[in-house]
Amino acid sequence: MAVNLERHEGSVIVMPETPVAAWPVSAFDALTPEHFQALVEAAPEVVIFGSGSRLRFPHPRLTAQLAKHRIGVETMDFGAACRTYNILMSEGRRVAAALLIEA
């Protein structure tokens, strides 16, 4: 996958005005609350979770810390997540995309 013409082989977190960061998760079934906790410090309004090639919803316990900090989570397949991120970013919203790329 390429973000801003830079190739990435694994899962990433994308936010406006910050470098793309590796997201250390390689499979949907390997997701833990700590994976989503990493997004709390950035304090986005909403996290767009790209669940891979098909739509899969994370268990609410995985995203509970985001909800506790009033950060919304929207789950989409990878393509829809990228499109939605681009739209929200162009509107100047504080958005983060957590994009799962399974090995």
Image (tube, rainbow, N blue to C red):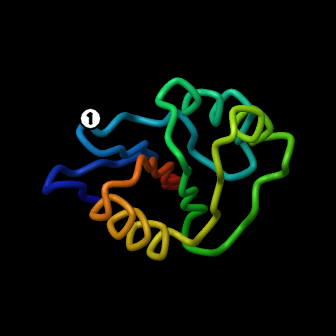
Which residue occupies 63% across, 49% down?
A: 27
Is residue 96 toward the left or the right of residue 73 in the image?
left
The image quadrant that residue 89 belongs to is bottom left
**What amino acid is at disc 1?**
Thr
The image quadrant that residue 90 belongs to is bottom left
Q: Residue furthest top?
A: 41
- SS state under label 1: loop
Q: Taking 42 as reference, is 47 above or below it? A: below
Instruction: Residue 83: give x, y in percent of width and height.
Output: 38, 73
* Foreground of the two, 11 or 45: 45
Instruction: Residue 52: give x, y in percent of width and height.
Output: 56, 65
Q: Name the residue under label 1.
A: 18
* Foreground of the two, 39 or 20: 39
Which residue occupies 54% across, 61% down?
A: 50
Q: Taking 102 as reference, is 44 above or below it? A: above
* Foreground of the two, 98 or 66: 66
Instruction: Residue 66: give x, y in percent of width and height.
Output: 69, 38
Is residue 73 toward the left or the right of residue 57 in the image?
left
Which residue occupies 86% across, 41% down?
A: 61
Which residue occupies 65% across, 51% down?
A: 72
* Foreground of the two, 91 or 55: 91
Label 1 crowd bin: few (<14), some (14–19), many (20+), radius 10 Å: few
Instruction: Residue 26: give x, y in percent of width and height.
Output: 56, 44
Q: Which residue lies furthest to the left in this view?
A: 5
Q: In which quarter of the image is the N terminus?
A: bottom left
The image quadrant that residue 32 belongs to is top right
Is residue 26 toward the left or the right of residue 37 in the image?
left
Please count the marks in the image. Answer: 1
